[in-house]
Amino acid sequence: MDGDEDTTVDVGADGPATDDDGLPQDTATDQSGADDLDQRLSGALERIGHVTRTMLSRQAYAEGVSALQLQLLLRLGSVAAGPRVSDLALELDVSQATVSDAMSTLRRKGLVAKEQDPGDRRNSVFSLTPEGDLLRTRLARWDRPLADKLVALSDADKGEVLRVVLGLVAGLQTDGVINVARTCMTCRFFDDTSHPDGPEPYRCNLLEVAFADTQLRVDCQEHQAPLTA
Ligand code: SF4
């Protein structure tokens, strides 16, 4: 910065409204007395959520599908067995009728195929057609702007953020705010008690492998919900 540059700013006669720490008030907080840091953190996560929704919608629009259709195509490409409408509705937190409508549109476009569920003849399962799989590959890059930013973080920082965010997701699932989370922290095979202070504090009891924060799974194909008593 130029040493002669005038950095003073006219803040008006009364000056800006400030918080107890002397910094300007943050509109992410409601000044109600609730924990200020919690509110700003929640506000920051909401910003990230807004950004990801916007990126997802833009990519979907560019490819001629809706945001929900994009999510369904990605979902169909990530699961081994063809999911049912009820499974997809639960995972995406929308009604079965909404999923059915979106699936009908995707089938009309030749992107999705519908078959009888081999395990239950009363139900249907869905899978991607070759055209749907090609589109899914292109749509999977919807998060590129955010991924480009994450590259600059260290693995240690990324692992810590992953652990904290997945911990929040697990807590929200426990409270019933979200329906489905196939993360390590919501899995019956997850053990965080064996070596809590070591570099690999977790253990997957399914595959008997120790692992670190950076390896936590967000959507594991082998995930199983804890057994209920
Ligand atoms: S099965 Fe998957 S989700 Fe469960 S603990 Fe192992 S890696 Fe994590």
Image: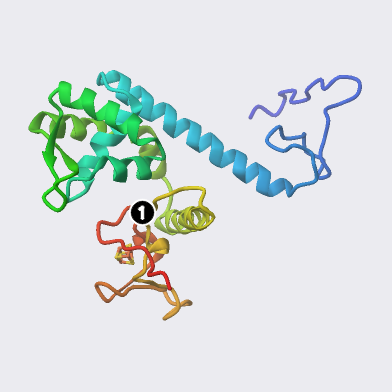
- Residue 3 drawn at (x, y percent): 70, 29
From the viewer's perspective, is 59 left or right of 170?
A: left
Q: Amino acid at mark 1?
A: Val
Name the one closer to the observer, 78 or 45. 78
Based on the displayed image, in which of its 4 quarters is residue 142 positioned? top left
From the viewer's perspective, is 47 left or right of 128?
A: right
The residue sitting at 41% across, 40% down in the picture is 93
Position of residue 214 relative to residue 60, above or below, is below
The residue sitting at 51% across, 48% down in the picture is 177
Name the one closer to the observer, 51 or 70. 70
Question: Would the CB of label 1 be found within 8 Å of ligand 1?
Answer: no
Ligand 1 image position (quadrant): bottom left
- Residue 26 drawn at (x, y percent): 72, 35
The C terminus sits in image quarter = bottom left
SS at mark 1 in the image: loop
Name the one closer to the observer, 69 or 57. 69
The N terminus sits in image quarter = top right
Answer whether residue 140 is visible to the viewer in this image. Answer: no
Answer whether residue 102 is visible to the viewer in this image. Answer: yes
Name the one closer to the observer, 125 or 180. 125
Few, some or many residues within 10 Å of mark 1 (<14, 14–19, 20+): some
The residue sitting at 73% across, 46% down in the picture is 36
From the viewer's perspective, is 172 left or right of 156?
A: right
Which of the colour schemes (rainbow, by chain, secondary structure, one colour) is used? rainbow
Q: Which residue is mark 1?
A: 218
The residue sitting at 68% across, 35% down in the picture is 28
List the single residue furthest toward the right. 13
Number of numbered labels in the structure image: 1
- Residue 197 drawn at (x, y percent): 48, 77
